[in-house]
Amino acid sequence: MNHVKSERIALTLACVLAFVFAFPYNVSAMHIMEGYLPLAQCVIWDAAALPFLAVGVVRVRHVLQSQRRLLILLAMSGAFIFVISSLKIPSVTGSCSHMTGTGLAAILFGPAITCVLGLIVLIFQAILLAHGGLTTLGANTFSMAIAGPLFAWFLYKLGKSLKINRKVNVFIAAAIGDLLTYCVTSLQLATAFPGESGVTASIAKFLGVFAPTQIPLAIVEGLLTVLIIMGMESFAEPELRELRWEGEIKA
């Protein structure tokens, strides 16, 4: 029975990926693209991301060595990030609006492992899909794979301690984690291109451009995250038990 469930999960993921790759992408719509940030800022963001990645690698190794049953959930979380962060809506020159998908992994595994999953996705997108870039990898990792997931995880834990309705709690964490990613992206772009009015005004400008597309996308991501966790409770109950999952959205 477990093998049948695993095959169903794999088949579903394969169908979703096939659907995504069936459509061409406009390469001008991406994460912060190659060469868009000054070299000095690229180095700064690389350095800022390294400590989080180091912790994440240790956590992933622990899962691979002692909790191998969780590999299915780990792979599904990574595939979810890859698929929905590849569906992009052009928003501003040099970047774009898109769902991040990192809230799911942050809720299940925590921000450290999510950081590693996000980095892997960003590398594949930069090399294979021309989304993002290698010089801006640190900046994109910090916004999408570190800041957003960390905030989503914090909100989820806070909501749980406050006994917020469980479905609502998952939704809020995933949706606001998505939005925070774009707050950090706006900061990164504004720091690189402050304009005549300064960094603060530039941040407000970038946020204003992102908001019309990103707010609806964040709502969609929150709903998708709730639905996917509900599906996991049906098809991957043993794996969730190993994560000490308490049926967070059943009640």
Image (tube, grey):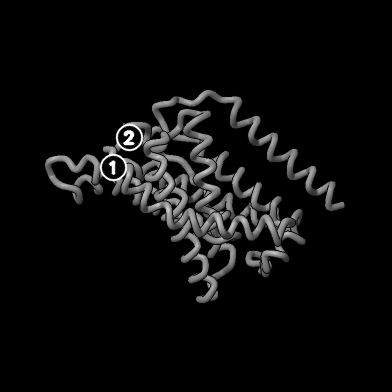
Q: Is residue 67 above or below residue 44?
A: below
Marks 2/1 in contact by CB < 8 Å: the verdict is yes
Q: Residue 189 bears which disc, if any?
A: 1
Cα distance between the residues tagged 2 and 1: 10 Å
Instruction: Using the image, determine if residue 7 lies above or below residue 227.
Output: above
| Residue drawn at (50%, 76%) of the image | 162
- Which residue occupies 62% across, 56% down? 61
Q: Residue at x 45, y 57 (%)?
A: 52
- Residue 74 is situated, as x and y percent measured from the top left of the image, at 64, 52
Task: Find numbered disc 2 in the image and state the secondary structure of the residue it sits on.
Answer: strand
Foreground mark, 2 or 1, reads: 1
Instruction: Residue 220: give x, y in percent of width and height.
Output: 52, 47
| Viewer-closest of 50 and 183 | 50
Quickly name the residue at label 2. 92
State which tag comes first along the sequence, 2 or 1: 2
- Type of amino acid under label 1: Leu
Give the farthest residue toward the bottom: 162
Instruction: Tell me: 196 left or right of 9.
Output: left
